[in-house]
Image (cartoon, rainbow, N blue to C red):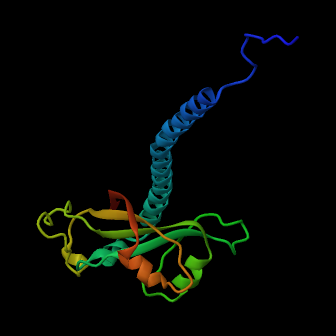
Amino acid sequence: MWRRCSCKPPGFSLVEVVLAVGVFAFSILALTALLIPALSSVSTVSDNNQAAGVISKLDAFLQTRPFSSVYQWVAGGREKVFLGYSLASEESGGSPREIVREPGDSRLDLEMRGAIGPVMMMEITASDANPGAEINPVLPEDLSTYRKAYLVLDVRIYRLPSLGPDDRAIDVIDGRRAVLILNFRTAVNR
């Protein structure tokens, strides 16, 4: 004769499985929500590290140039544009170097396509912190009329996107797709 066992069969019921999957999905969703701000923070730290490297290189570059040439770059309201990036064709494996080009220079397209990693653009203009330039930071064209022992410069650092197959460097550099990372001030002495 068969007897019925009053004990529960081993395993989980459908309700228990659905509840366990729901708790697991809710936990994963909460962890994913925490991951998004963390990734944004990592991107910001990366941009700041790159900007710090660019600042030190650019400042060293400016300090080694004759005062007259730095003055002429920004006199009369002009700005000077510097680009910094690594090239795949370099034997050193793409060590960072500063490329100084005018925005319309035809070599930019080729070099920016061969860049490894981010392309950083630095725009340098005369600052309104220069003595006598509080209202208008435009400096006179003639250096002999500038009597101060130093020149204060405003620098804006942008991260440029990679060039697409139909993009021209000048279109990217003109700021339509550049992302401003940092503004800072520096000075050069006579």
Residue 71 sits in which quadrant? bottom left
Q: Nearer the viewer, residue 2 or 118?
A: 2
How many numbered circles are shown? 0
Residue at 73%, 10% (x, y): give it.
Answer: 6
For residue 26, above or below residue 81: above
Indicate left or right for 93 with 186 as reference: right
Residue at 34%, 77% (x, y): give it.
Answer: 73
Question: What is the quadrant of the C terminus in the image?
Answer: bottom left
Indicate left or right for 127 with 1 as reference: left
Residue at 71%, 66% (x, y): give it.
Answer: 92
The furthest residue to the right = 1
The furthest residue to the left = 135
Q: Position of residue 39 (x, y in %)?
A: 50, 47
Task: Examine the rendering and report whether any part of residue 102 can be seen.
Answer: no
For residue 26, above or below residue 116: above
For residue 27, above or below residue 41: above
Q: Nearer the viewer, residue 51 or 148?
A: 51
Indicate left or right for 4 with 178 as reference: right
Indicate left or right for 135 with 182 as reference: left
Question: What is the quadrant of the N terminus in the image?
Answer: top right
Residue 78 sits in which quadrant? bottom left
Q: Position of residue 64 (x, y in %)?
A: 46, 65
Q: Position of residue 136 (x, y in %)?
A: 14, 70
Task: Examine the rendering and report whether any part of residue 121 can be seen.
Answer: yes
Q: Position of residue 116 (x, y in %)?
A: 62, 68
Residue at 41%, 65% (x, y): give it.
Answer: 158
